[in-house]
Image (cartoon, rainbow, N blue to C red):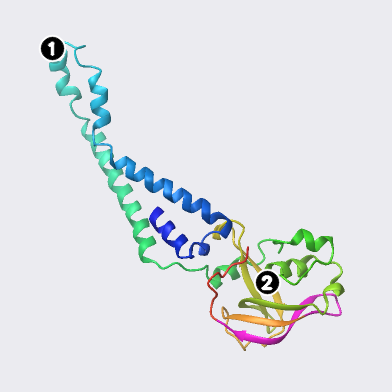
Amino acid sequence: MAVVTLGLGLTGRLTLYISPESIWFACAAAVVTIAGAIWSCALPLGAEGDHDHGHDHGHASAADDTAGTGAEAAPSSPRRALATAGTVAGGVVASGVVVAALVLPPASLSVELAMSRVGEQTALFAGADDVTLGVADTATFGVGDWASVFATATNTAAYDGKTVTLTGFVTPTGDDEVSLTRLVITHCVIDAQPATVPVTIDAGEFETGQWIEVEGTVKADADGALHVEPTTVTAIDEPGDPYEY
């Protein structure tokens, strides 16, 4: 697993599982793990047992040695069977994990998982503190930042007319509308949460899960709700780094 981690780190695919800020730590831990595994192979089997027995030489009589041979020479049969079963079970589990890591190609989280997590918590992501304090510089905003604006902004008119260029995948929202969605992670894919912004696109124009790039303008409705009015929508392949951070 440490070798796989290093391989993913060197090929730039480790970001499919953890945030870029954590890559150095994961790779350093992998190097330490490999070094420890190599070092452990240098210890001969049974060496620790021989060391313990060396302190007993000359301190017991020949009669005691003869008497203890039958009772202590080998562990009891149930104990030996339990140790063997534990070794086999551990080997099978470890081998399965390693084989899966080697055979299965690295992949991003599925669209279905993103859709299943929608609504688990308030959409509040990176930059949310800046958004709540006032109108921030939106030039570098991603889907996660705009999701926070759409969910928390009290003066939505201040964002009306802002131009955006956003990348994400299409998810349905009902009523013949769609949302542009992107998974946002803090540390790794375990904490991934979907960020969504409504986009005025015909629901039948793109399939669910299709990645698109949207260029357009943020518009405020009469009731103050925000949405993106696109000028161009382009279907694209999934980007090499499908997450926001």
Q: Amino acid at mark 2?
A: Thr
Figure check: 126 above or below 87: below
Q: Magenta segment, principal secondary structure?
A: strand
Q: Nearer the viewer, residue 109 or 122?
A: 109
Residue 109 percent location from the top left of the image? 52, 67
Which residue corresponds to the image point at 24% horizontal and 36% vertical from the top-left?
44
Q: Nearer the viewer, residue 177 or 216?
A: 216
User: For numbered disc 2, what is the local secondary structure?
Assistant: strand
Which residue corresponds to the image point at 60% horizontal and 70% vertical from the top-left?
115
For label 2, count other residues whose C-alpha is less than 10 Å away and answer few (under 14), some (14-19) or many (20+).
many
Q: Give the magenta part as a residue range.
A: 218-236
Image quarter of the C terminus: bottom right
Q: CA distance from mark 1 to mark 2?
A: 81 Å
Which of the two discs, 1 and 2, labels the residue nearer the N terminus?
Answer: 1
Left or right of residue 210: residue 56:
left
Left or right of residue 126: residue 34:
left
| Total marks placed | 2
Q: Which mark is residue 165?
A: none
- Residue highlighted by disc 2: 196
- Residue highlighted by disc 1: 63
176 is within the stretch colored magenta: no
**Residue 1 showing in the rendered view:** no
Left or right of residue 236: residue 220:
right
223 is within the stretch colored magenta: yes
Figure check: 173 above or below 17: below
Figure check: 202 above or below 70: below
Q: Quadrant of residue 198?
A: bottom right
**Residue 178 showing in the rendered view:** yes
